[in-house]
Image (cartoon, rainbow, N blue to C red):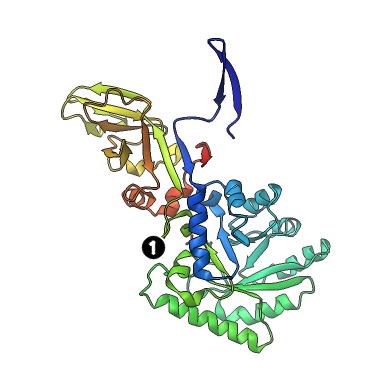
Amino acid sequence: MNKKIDIIQNNKKVVCFMDLRATRVEINISQFHHNLLVFKKMIGDKPLCLAIKGNAYGHGLVSMAFHAQEFVDVFGVATVGEGIKLRENGITQAIFVMSSHVENEIPLLCQYKLTPFVSHGVYIDKYQYWAEYYQMMFPIHLKIDTGMGRSGVMPDNALFIAQKILDSPNLILEGLCTHFAMADESESIYTSQQLQIFQKIIDTLQLNGISPPLIHAANTAGIINFRESHFTLARLGIGAYGYANHEEIAPVLSFKSKITIVKTIPKGYTVSYGCTWTAQKTTTIGIIPVGYADGYQRSLSNKAKVMIKGQLYPIIGVVCMDQIMVELPNNSQLWLEEDVLLYGNDSYLNADTVARWANTISYELLVSIAERVPRIYL
Ligand SMILES: *Cc1c(COP(=O)(O)O)cnc(C)c1O
């Protein structure tokens, strides 16, 4: 990324960055470090797993891993491919593969020393086979479904599968974990019920002489709202990137662009596909080269606002694949190349607000920022 080319202009050498387009994501690394420290303070000296899946929630997988390295003990990815990418870029910390995988990926898990979360007994023989093949001890975590209704073994099967893992000479039952469905609602008893079920399994295993060293349940909301969910490790995600109900953290990423065309349209003229917006008077509009191919959702059409010179301006017409149009004030004729904040580190115009306009959540907005948008680390 950011390949440089030298060009000669008026006998002077000018350096151009090939991906220095108007639209970019600026990532504030000191804010990221600050957020990490806020959560580290909450969990004490327990090891911290940073969820870095989904291209580090859109922030850039490998770069964020490097910037987080000195603060976290484990990285959490969803896919084997994300784990391999981290390994190939020199990341040596433990890596949890938190989503499920197919049998063909098991040799890769072993080769790249990636730690899977196990949700059924079918692959245990296969893990054993490949661990033996590579002559290694292979750590795995047993995941329990305590109410999420997604991955994890049902509570009644936990002991049986734990035994099966322990009976496999090349496997290590390193961890026992679960995941919350409602931890962002601090008043809800659902999380307490999940914790009770989890604790019962911890106790049952212990009675049978099984005590995996890493017991973990908490995501960001769990860390903040349920102190008793911290166990011996926490899995921090969205909070590290600045989106959680905690006043000491702030967004790390700002999605920005520039106005690249300013023009005036007459009363009655319509804007964008489908002619959904009509000028009620002579209107100055700005065109911004960002669209749904960049991860700026089409559902924001005629709804969202962007910030220019500290003020909010409405998007008019539908969001195109590569462009949006904004209604500007009449004195904006000279706003060519003016900076535009789409959303980011702003108390109002952040991913939560824009996600509400798009009828989604900050997570989905952030991970949707496309590969083609350059990430600039500040
Ligand atoms: C993504 C993920 C997390 C982090 O969740 P946040 O809500 O972003 O903190 C934790 N655990 C698992 C299993 C995950 O997949």
Residue 226: horizontal and vertical position, in percent?
45, 74
For the residue pair 240 and 152, the one nearer the viewer reads as 240
Q: Residue at x 45, y 38 (%)?
A: 294
Residue 237, can we see it? no
Quadrant that contains the N terminus: top right
Q: Answer left or right for 118 relative to 272.
A: right
Q: Residues within 10 Å of mark 1 (few under 14, many from 20)?
A: few
User: Does label 1 point to a residue whose CB lies under 8 Å from ligand 1?
Assistant: no
As helix, strand or loop, the secondary structure at mark 1 comes to loop
| Residue 333, image x, y percentages | 27, 23
Depicted 164 relative to depicted 100: above or below: below
Q: Residue furthest bottom?
A: 207
Q: Quadrant of residue 154?
A: bottom right
Q: Position of residue 221 (x, y in %)?
A: 44, 66
Q: Is residue 96 above or below residue 148?
A: above
Please state which of residues 11 and 162 is positioned toward the viewer in this rendering.
11
Q: Please, which residue is most extreme toward the top here?
A: 10
Res. 127 image quadrant: bottom right
Residue shown at the point (68%, 68%) measured from the top left? 140
Q: Is residue 47 visible?
A: yes
Which residue was labeled with disc 1? 245
Identified at 51% across, 61% down, the residue is 37
Please tell me whether residue 205 is drawn above or below residue 326 in the rendered image. Answer: below
Q: Amino acid at mark 1?
A: Asn
Residue 94 lies, in percent from the top left, at 67, 61
